[in-house]
Image (spheres, rainbow, N blue to C red):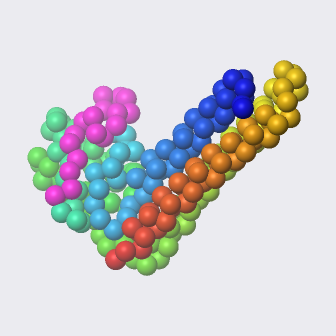
Amino acid sequence: MISEELELIIDSAEENMKEAASFCKKEFSHIRAGKASPTLLDGIKVNYYGSQTPLNQLASVSAPEARLLVVQPFDKSTMEDIEKAIMASGLGLNPNNDGSLIRIPLPMLSEERRVELVKHAKEVAEKARISIRNSRRDANDEIKKTVQEESLPEDSRFEAEDTVQNLTDKYIKLVDDMLEVKESEIMTV
């Protein structure tokens, strides 16, 4: 039976592991795969009256075709600023402004670019895994400290550490599964 103090430590560790996994998922959504996705432009900030405003607050983004994104600004005066922000985003996109819409054709990814994107995805996944393992280490340190300070039985320490290890395995597997899906998305021609 795990004591309440140790349960709190485990819950905190799980919360940190969840955050790492959701960070990974969010970062993966910004990595361009084979087909157009409106989430590709989520990280773009536009200089709007002197402040950096997320693109999705200034325009609606849709993907009417597999290789085309369409950005429809709510305010036509922001067209040039949106276009500049998309070009400066580092995504390698060339927007076409027709006065009312911004069309962004997505070029086919070269094999070299696909390999680069997979490498980047692996780096993001590794950061998430490191964060998860750091959460495990911090939780285990906290468990040991609490067991000593509260004079709790050693069995509860081992049980709590096993629980933390199971959570670590679960979230690392989740990150690995997300990476596998993203890799196959990127490499699919």
Give percent across and percent down for residue 173. 57, 57
Was residue 11 drawn as part of the magenta stretch in this picture? no
Q: Quadrant of the N terminus?
A: top right
Q: What number of labels is visible? A: 0
Q: Quadrant of the C terminus?
A: bottom left
Q: Nearer the viewer, residue 47 or 1?
A: 1
Looking at this view, name the residue that lies furthest to the top. 150
The relative height of residue 106 versus residue 15 in the rendered view (above or below) is below
Was residue 57 drawn as part of the magenta stretch in this picture? yes
Q: Nearer the viewer, residue 29 or 180?
A: 180
Is residue 94 at all visible to an observer of this figure? no
Q: Is residue 179 left or right of residue 97?
A: right
Give percent across and percent down for residue 53. 34, 33
Give percent across and percent down for residue 104. 24, 58
Is residue 179 at all visible to an observer of this figure? yes
Quadrant housing residue 36: bottom left
Q: Residue at x 69, y 42 (%)?
A: 164
Q: Is residue 99 left or right of residue 135?
A: left
Q: Which residues are magenta?
A: 48-64
Q: Residue at x 48, y 58 (%)?
A: 178
Quadrant housing residue 148: top right
Q: Is residue 108 left or right of residue 137?
A: left
Q: Nearer the viewer, residue 20 or 114?
A: 20
Looking at this view, name the residue that lies furthest to the front. 1
Q: Residue at x 37, y 29 (%)?
A: 51
Give percent across and percent down for residue 131. 65, 45
Quadrant housing residue 159: top right
Q: Residue at x 58, y 49 (%)?
A: 171
Magenta stretch, main secondary structure class: strand
